Amino acid sequence: MNRLRVGVLVDSKARANLRADYGLSLYLESERWRVLFDTGPSDAVLEFNASAMGVDLSKLDLVLISHEHFDHTGGLPALARAGSRAPVLIPAGASWRLERAIEDLGLPVRKVVAGGEVLPGAFLLSQQYGPPYEQALAVNLGGKGLVTVQGCSHPGPSRIVAKALNDTGVKPFAVVGGLHLAWSPPESVQTELKALASLGVRTMIPLHCSGELVLKEARRFGIEAKEAVAGDWLEL
């Protein structure tokens, strides 16, 4: 696989014709599959933004929920209304309430105990930390390396990337998603950026809970940080 297209469906900032909301939802598209990574906090916002961006929620191959906080799961009813039959993967440590809520929507749900390749070139990184237990996705772009897609990075951004390297044996080059550094002191942000750079990360698209300081400091560590908001399409 040589290309990954990322559509930012939900973020706390948005382009003028879309709706902003505090949460995260990403549409991931390769030559062979379509994945929804998290759903944001609102089904109405997810539906509106997906429609505006030309994303058909009924034609997904997989839905991955990083963790069970509402700002990542609130949009799930939109998938039911769209008629999605894509399996919804949730962390093994997620509560029975989340699992039951997804079942009640009529969506197929599966708790993930062990990670591994879930689609060609796409590897689920099984849960870390907890609670909230959080899982992530790593996409192998061949000669470029891995892209890790992260929801909130409660375990720590660099811990997730290190797990991706350990699980796949492929060197990471890009990180997309929430990094949970918005409330961290500058020293902690710098420590994480240094660790990410040492793991091979050269490109970063910080969203949701990442904070402005990440964008300002990344270049000092040899990382190109690209700002993105809901409505943006990114090519990796």
Image (spheres, rainbow, N blue to C red):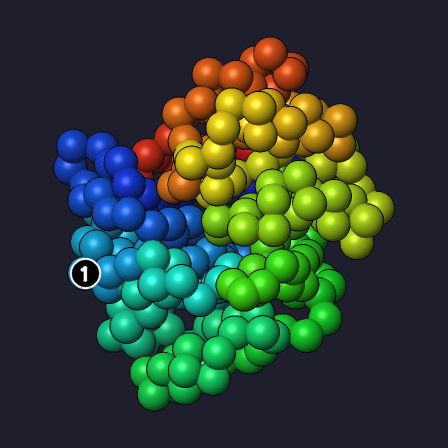
**Residue 120 falls left or right of residue 154:** right
**Residue 113 falls left or right of residue 93:** right
For residue 213, which quarter of the picture? top left
Q: Is residue 120 visible?
A: no
Q: Residue 169, percent across and down?
A: 84, 46
Q: Residue 35, percent across and down?
A: 49, 58
**Residue 171 falls left or right of residue 19:** right
The total of numbered circles placed on residues is: 1
Specify few, some or many for label 1: CA neighbours under 10 Å numbering under 14, 14-19, or 20 or more: some
* Vertical comparison of 50 with 182: above or below: below
* Vertical comparison of 96 with 19: above or below: below
* Vertical comparison of 108 with 222: above or below: below
Could you tell me the amino acid type at mark 1? Ala
The quadrant the N terminus occupies is: top right
**Residue 54 falls left or right of residue 97:** left
The quadrant the C terminus occupies is: top right
Q: Residue 157, percent across and down?
A: 60, 41
Question: Residue at the location (65% across, 15% down)?
Answer: 222
Question: Residue at the location (78% across, 37% down)?
Answer: 171
What residue sits right under mark 1 in the picture? 44
For residue 161, which quarter of the picture? top right
Q: Is residue 128 visible?
A: yes
Which type of secondary structure does the marked residue at label 1 adopt?
Answer: helix
**Furthest residue toward left:** 17
Question: Residue at the location (24% across, 36% down)?
Answer: 14
Q: Residue 96, percent across and down?
A: 47, 84
Query: Foreground: 90 or 190?
Result: 190
Query: Foreground: 190 or 45?
Result: 190
Question: Residue at the location (36% across, 82% down)?
Answer: 101
* Vertical comparison of 203 with 49: above or below: above
